[in-house]
Amino acid sequence: MRLAIDSPTTVAETARELVASATTTDPDQHLEQLCVNVIRGLAMDAVQKANSGHPGMPLGIADAACVLWDRFLKHHPADPNWPNRDRFVLSAGHASMLLYSLLHLTGYDLSLDDIKQFRQLQSRTPGHPEYGLTPGVETTTGPLGQGISNAVGMAMAEQVLAARFNQPGYPVVDHMTYAIVSDGDLMEGISYEVASLAGHLQLGKLIVLYDSNHISIDGSTDLTFTENIEQRFAACGWHVIKVNGHNRQEVAWAIEQARQVNNRPSMIVCDTIIGYGSPNRQGTAKSHGEPLGGDEVLLTKEALGLPTDKPFFVPDEVYTHMRRAHAERAGQQQSWESMMLRYREVYPDLAELWDTMQSGQLPDDWSAVLPTWDTDAKAIATRAASGTAINALAKVLPGLLGGSADMNQSNQTLVKGEEAIQAERFDGRNLYYGVREHAMGGIMNGIALHGGLLPYGGTFLVFSDYMRPAIRMAALMSLQVVYVFTHDSIGVGEDGPTHQPIEHVPALRVIPNLFVMRPADATETVQAWRVALERRNGPTALILTRQGLPVLNRNGTAYGRFGPLASAEGVLRGGYVLYSAPEPQAVLIATGSEVALALQAALLLEADGMAVRVVSMPCCELFDQQDQDYRDAVLLPSVTARVAVEAAASFGWQRYVGSQGRIVGIDTFGVSAPGAEVFRYYGLTAERVAATVKDVVHAGG
Amino acid sequence: MRLAIDSPTTVAETARELVASATTTDPDQHLEQLCVNVIRGLAMDAVQKANSGHPGMPLGIADAACVLWDRFLKHHPADPNWPNRDRFVLSAGHASMLLYSLLHLTGYDLSLDDIKQFRQLQSRTPGHPEYGLTPGVETTTGPLGQGISNAVGMAMAEQVLAARFNQPGYPVVDHMTYAIVSDGDLMEGISYEVASLAGHLQLGKLIVLYDSNHISIDGSTDLTFTENIEQRFAACGWHVIKVNGHNRQEVAWAIEQARQVNNRPSMIVCDTIIGYGSPNRQGTAKSHGEPLGGDEVLLTKEALGLPTDKPFFVPDEVYTHMRRAHAERAGQQQSWESMMLRYREVYPDLAELWDTMQSGQLPDDWSAVLPTWDTDAKAIATRAASGTAINALAKVLPGLLGGSADMNQSNQTLVKGEEAIQAERFDGRNLYYGVREHAMGGIMNGIALHGGLLPYGGTFLVFSDYMRPAIRMAALMSLQVVYVFTHDSIGVGEDGPTHQPIEHVPALRVIPNLFVMRPADATETVQAWRVALERRNGPTALILTRQGLPVLNRNGTAYGRFGPLASAEGVLRGGYVLYSAPEPQAVLIATGSEVALALQAALLLEADGMAVRVVSMPCCELFDQQDQDYRDAVLLPSVTARVAVEAAASFGWQRYVGSQGRIVGIDTFGVSAPGAEVFRYYGLTAERVAATVKDVVHAGG
């Protein structure tokens, strides 16, 4: 058989010839055709009933999807969390009814009644697939390009875990990752980023089926998308095959070929007709994103040979076939479980490690390794403290796995003494994402979704914008992912406004379910890592300085007139009283590098006879979760003279400083100059903070 | 000469053979070499003096850059704004010293003293090039991938304007767009997006030089970036040549070839050595982003034949050569000006149009075309009102040019009766960006930077995240760009949480210099467009509904007990009193679809005998710019019972409602269900708003 990576078209022709010359002797072909059409019928009916949704793609890609699920996918509908199952990602989430149909027909806990509730309030069949809501849905998709990036992350996780656990005769981790993508997925920049990295890493167990239907929402892809997809993926080191997506034998042949290519990810370009079967809408953008209409549904059912008087039609033989096929493969889980019993005996240590990593639980004594600093330590950047923490944590948290988008040194994200993860060398601990922040975000989500690993990833805070859509997905899916965002303010200095975050901290705070932590010194940084690691149900963004910060003296000796600074364990409550006069006239609230500034201002004010309190507020989201008593004890409702200090846009601080308060922040873009000068230029000085506090107190705040 | 697109390596070999076989007879070669080394010297010295910056790339790409500027670039340093100049984009903005050196040597208003102030406060030589700050800098670069997207936008603008203005014998608009990019630029997803679109549009006058030095910050690109660049760009329909970036004859040959290819953009892969000339650092990541060190600078100068005792060395013959070459080409501007005098006589109407579009001024009577609606009109989605406005405006604003990231119908961004802009058909008005939001953002910036056109572009609000880095650049550069963000809330309905914006409106509000406008009805939408068009110094994001909204009755008839609703011209002040009882007990503040909700709540409260005021606040940024008297007159400082209503994260509203106020918003992700149900699910109802107002009033707010 001829397989020429550089000329996928030739391959497709080969495939077609092969199929054409083959005698279709499979007695299941008629039944499989019925299964495909039943999937189409369910998709049409559900969209029609909801009067909302996307029928075109389920109709078009049902053949290929059915082949994949029916003949290849290794999974167990009764145990959707079996660790060694194949992963399936519907990157084009708008085709959700395709997935729901497959889940229902193959026996997942998703009933026909669920499907009839498509897109209704609190149903398990929302408009786009949602992870955690519907059994068998491996990731939430809809925003294009995210799914394929998740799939790449899953395939990477598979390789990393296989390198750690597999032993001769014991393929503990050995599964495929499949994805179905649309032209929209492949137009998004993130898809190119992850394709380039997947090719570099030679992810041979990743197989992507591209539903090439030549139609996007605006019309024909000829309007805007005429690149040579096969050549593009070949350029990224992929194995590429092109097939007729409605010829199931061809699709099966292509998947079989792809499974045999172990040193490259595979792209199967499936030429399809969007809205297949719909006499008046197939092949048109009109079939993409709106119901076909009752009449057209009937015409389509007629064309497909489905009964027109039975909505949500599923004959028994379809259930029998789809579930029998899977019952057969469910046996694979049983074999795997048996193997694991033997593995536990032969490799008890590895088996224990497996259990630990699968559980995602932290070992009992994990926090004992957290680094501490002498209070007379010289200034330490919080990014450096984070790097020290990562290196300590890596020793006790085998699942911790991270890297950076080409700034491993700057972000201090490397685990020293560990290797870079590369093709055929997945036993390292350090990931090199390249200058691909968005890919990193999506891949981290995939790693977290896969299970067994806890991903972290770094870039400059200002470039968090590049990965924002993936951050949102992590928050939406409640994934435990840790972002190491360094160079967190104008403190970046000379690189100037393009590299100085202004709006990024508040812009991240506004994402639901994301913790944004901006620690004040090395000690708080370690506590911030602690919060991030103990938080199982959502992502955490660590906001860290480029520049050195003093390690605050928390050893019990007095800081100013009124006593010592509080323990950094206050970080665990989001915000805490770092230092306070007994009856403060004013409350200073600060985060990160501005906490030291606030303390200096407090000393200046003390010298002028004023009594003030300094609150360190590394994590607003966590603070807001504390009970009212605690929050009042920190912020003192009776003290309305409050000043917040943060080298960032002031937006949002009003909720803590109130109507009489003031905010010392920066509401314009930055400037290029040495960092210390930039701080002075924007008035982020102890003197100005102190003056602002006086103003507020004198104004009767 | 052989030029095989599918085998660029062969092309490179051809080029090399060609050059090797050629006799270098050019007497200027020695002088050009000196110019190149002087550029290198300036870059090293400036970085060393600042003790901060990126020497590696200026050293590496100086040969190719000097060839481009010295032999090809058509520009006039004395008139940096000459409309028909070639555009040059340094996409890899960290190589800023390369650009500053070229600007200085060729005679732009940038002195050696300016260069000695590299990276210092308020200098004209900031860490990364900044548009508007330094003459000759065509765009602000630094965030990777942005520059190449701007270049694509400039090349598109050139073609659009050429199609409008050029006449036989009158090439009014006829210039090249050049860009220098780094591996970092090409790893970013946006670069693939724009490359795909540039290839589709066959932008033959775009030439990109890729500084292929095999080094990124983390080390060798072998760590992560091993795709076949030549094949990738060929896949996108580009003309690709690979050359030795240190062989200036080869580079010149390649540029000459590229200039002759008119139906494809060109990618010239320049193999270079990063930190060229530095004995101990060349070819290493160490040379990328930090000063070489004083000793190494001296060693490098020795190696390059530069005097070691003269920092910032520029011999007279270098000035003479670099400026003479350009003086010669400046004659091109004079020829063009002469041609334009004749053009004005032969094509007076076109010349007048040219002046209008170049000025960017709105015609006197432009606002007369703005659509109005009867107050008894049926519900109209604000996206539909925006579409109507666009179609009216397109008639009187010839420079208005827009499209969508594959949702022209949904975003209502099409100008009816106008053609799609396609390859060789640039006389249309409608752009099809494909599912490439980030590309759209960067390209719009390039179009705005080019001049002569006013770009707008649409996508769903939730996908504004995908283009956020480009939005930031528009705001940073104060570009007039209009974003048409539709489907602006949970009102999206069935598509569910992946498609329902929650955090996006506040996340956009926090970007400095961006106007975020969320109009309440069709009439306000038109006024929002008016603000966006009259705003010359920054971008505006229009936040528009999917669902229909009532057209508020502003015709003078009473709305409730207290009188008619105010004119929508209040939008021009950002926020205004829409409806008010004479002495209100409470102030309701709302935006967009929630304004009607607030009005309904006001009626409910009136019925209960309460006096309330409803403020429509479509643009907080504009409102904040009004004087204190106006703001107080709207918000009434004495009334502390305030409630803000917005179907979005509540973050940030505290600054208007104050300590006693309340916010009716949504601080979790959305759900999939029909839109009206989702509004009820989240308590965004008139009843709940009214109840909240009562609570606040009763609490003594």
Image (cartoon, coloured by chain):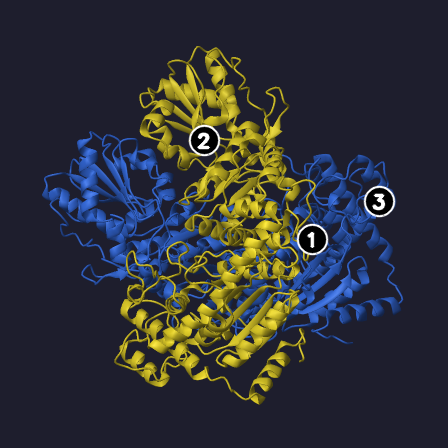
Chain colours: A blue, B yellow
Residue A87 at least partly seen: yes
Residue occupying the point 59% across, 86% down: B17
Q: Nearer the viewer, mark 1 or mark 2?
A: 2
Reply above or below: A94 against B545.
Answer: below
Residue A237 at least partly seen: no
Residue occupying the point 53% across, 62% down: B335
Of callouts 1 and 3, which one flags the residue occurring earlier in the amino acid sequence? 1
Q: Which mark is residue A279?
A: 3
- The amino acid sitting under disc 2 is Leu
Q: Locate residue A366 relative to residue A42 in the image: left or right.
A: left
Chain under numbered label 1: A
The quadrant of the image that shows the N terminus of chain B is: bottom right
Q: Around disc 3, counting alpha carbons within 10 Å, would you say few (fewer than 14), some (14 to 19), or many (20 or more)?
A: some
Where does label 2 land, which residue? Answer: B572
Quadrant of the image occupied by residue B485:
top right
- Residue B466's x, y, as percent? 53, 51
Where does label 1 land, which residue? Answer: A223
Q: CA distance from mark 2 to mark 3?
A: 51 Å
The quadrant of the image that shows the C terminus of chain B is: top left
Reply above or below: B111 against B416.
Answer: below
- Residue A279's x, y, as percent? 84, 44
Q: Locate residue A131 relative to residue A554 in the image: left or right.
A: right
In this orientation, which residue lies closer to the viewer: A233 or B35? Answer: B35
